[in-house]
Image (tube, rainbow, N blue to C red):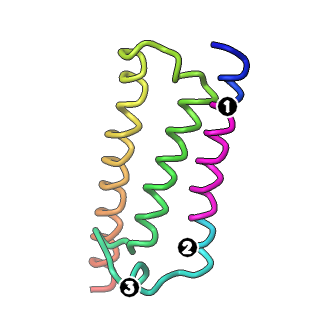
Amino acid sequence: MSKENSTREIWLVFWILLIVTAVEVILGIIKPPVLTENYVIGVSLLNMTFIILTIVKAYYIVYAFMHLGSERKNLKISILLPVWILIPYLLFILLSESTFQEFMLHG
């Protein structure tokens, strides 16, 4: 890979991470009522949006800065599969159990 191509890829990842972070900050400041008043699994859509954007940022960080982009397809899949399946599953369990606990405590 040439140095120019590598630099271009780093800048692309930088801009993607900047945009995703800017969207997170803007949503955190504005807090649109449509996202704060609607709930999924006991969590507001705003928080669910933050979770999804954080997973996207984690993917790009692993892909670019841990040089996963230049690896073989099987290695990429074995590393990224837990990110895209296990982490959302664990978050689902965490959020559904916390909603159940809140319901049990406050009726």
| Quarter of the image with the N terminus in it | top right
The question of residue 91 being in magenta is answered with no
Quadrant of the rendered structure where residue 41 is? Answer: bottom left
Mark drawn on residue 37:
3
Q: Amino acid at mark 1?
A: Arg
Q: Nearer the viewer, residue 87 or 69?
A: 69
Distance of label 1 from label 2 (alpha carbons): 29 Å
Callout 2 secondary element: helix
Circle 1 is placed at which residue position?
8
Mark 3 near mark 1, Cβ–Cβ under 8 Å? no
Q: What percent of the width, then of the height, locates residue 66?
A: 61, 25
Circle 2 Cα neighbour tier, 10 Å, few/some/many (<14 / 14–19 / ≥20):
some
Main secondary structure along the magenta-highlighted residues: helix
Q: Amino acid at mark 2?
A: Leu
Distance of label 2 from label 3 (alpha carbons): 14 Å
Distance of label 3 from label 1 (alpha carbons): 41 Å
Residue at 29% from the left image edge and 63% from the top image edge? 96
Which of discs 2 and 3 lies nearer the camera? The answer is 2
Q: What percent of the width, then of the height, locates residue 25?
A: 63, 68
Mark drawn on residue 27:
2
In the rendered structure, the answer to whether residue 102 lies left or right of residue 2 reads: left
Mark closest to the chain's N terminus, 2 or 3 = 2
Circle 1 Cα neighbour tier, 10 Å, few/some/many (<14 / 14–19 / ≥20):
few
The question of residue 15 being in magenta is answered with yes
- Tell me where the magenta segment starts and ends, as one range: 8-23
